[in-house]
Amino acid sequence: MKQLKKGVPHIFLLLYLAVILFPFLFVLFSSVKTDNGAIAANPFGLPTEFAWDNYVKAWVNAKISTYFVNSLYISLAASVSTILIASLASFAITRMRYKKMSAAVFQFILLGLLIPGNALLLPIYGILKNLNMLDKHWALYVPYTAGAIPFTIIILAAFMRSLPSEIEEAAVIDGLNAPGIFFRVILPLTVPALVTVFIVNFLGNWNEFLLANFFISTDNLRTLPVGMVGFRDTYNTNYAQMAAGIVYSVVPVMVIYAILQEKIIEGLTAGGVKG
């Protein structure tokens, strides 16, 4: 009876996993079928003949290489910039001796989490228009970087607060100043949290659609999610190639998350279990 009770949660988890994976498996199987007829004849089954050239055709027809590179470098650049700004702010808030001011600044930054992202769409558009950044990658880089700062500071500040103050005292005795303490002591110790926020921010930037759709109109500057929508509209009669294009946009994110998911959990929980 005890074994049955222990097995019930696992059964529910397996069912949940099947529900989550089913849509992706449907797209994956459809991407290697020969044509629409094969998909219609057996939409949920394995293909009888594998058409791997769908991926080559989708790569060429949808210009996925261009969209992929755009998404990759914008997501990377924005994530790295967010980490740099947020880590400096977190260090100043948690480790430097300005308690009243630090608390006020921290609360002010957290207000950014209370404002819905869609409510900022028009103000951001106006600012970017005045700065002549529309239809440039800056139109995505700046909002992506700024929008992720509040969440990033929450994670990094929680981690930095858990570090013992004796570490800084020893660094001061060794002759380090504030920049030296940050770059040579605090930053290396904060690597688990840095990896966590980098992954979360990168995935958010990679999958973002609304800003990329409204602020970028030149086709060669578009990111992968927006480019895939255009590919769907153009080649909506060829579902096999469309499914191959969807796989291109989904697989990189799944691979990154599968490899680094332990780092995400470690970084999110480290600040709560130390100190």
Image (cartoon, rainbow, N blue to C red):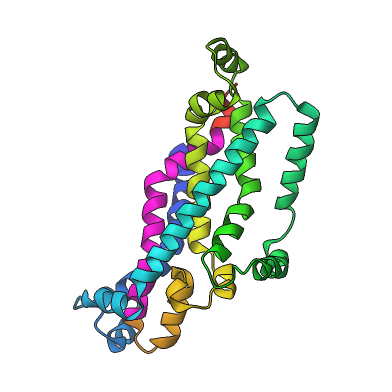
Residue 268, magenta (yes or no): yes
Q: Residue at x 54, y 31 (%)?
A: 270
Question: Would you place residue 196 above or below residue 46 in this image?
Answer: above
Is any atom of residue 161 visible in this view? yes
Q: Which residues are magenta?
A: 241-269
- Name the residue rendered at 51%, 65% in the picture: 137
Q: x%, y% of residue 268?
A: 55, 38
What percent of the width, then of the height, locates residue 187? 51, 30
- Identify the residue at horizontal 54%, vertical 64% (top origin): 208
Q: Residue furthest left?
A: 49
Q: Quadrant of residue 163?
A: top right
In the rendered image of this protein, does residue 80 appear above or below residue 100? below
Q: Is residue 237 magenta?
A: no
Q: Residue at x 71, y 64 (%)?
A: 120
The dominant secondary structure in magenta is helix
Depicted 3 relative to depicted 214: above or below? above
Q: Quadrant of residue 64?
A: bottom left
Residue 104 placement, left or right of 149: right
Q: Quadrant of the C terminus?
A: top right
Query: 135 or 47, which lies in front?
Result: 135
Q: How many marks?
A: 0
Q: Is residue 31 visible?
A: no
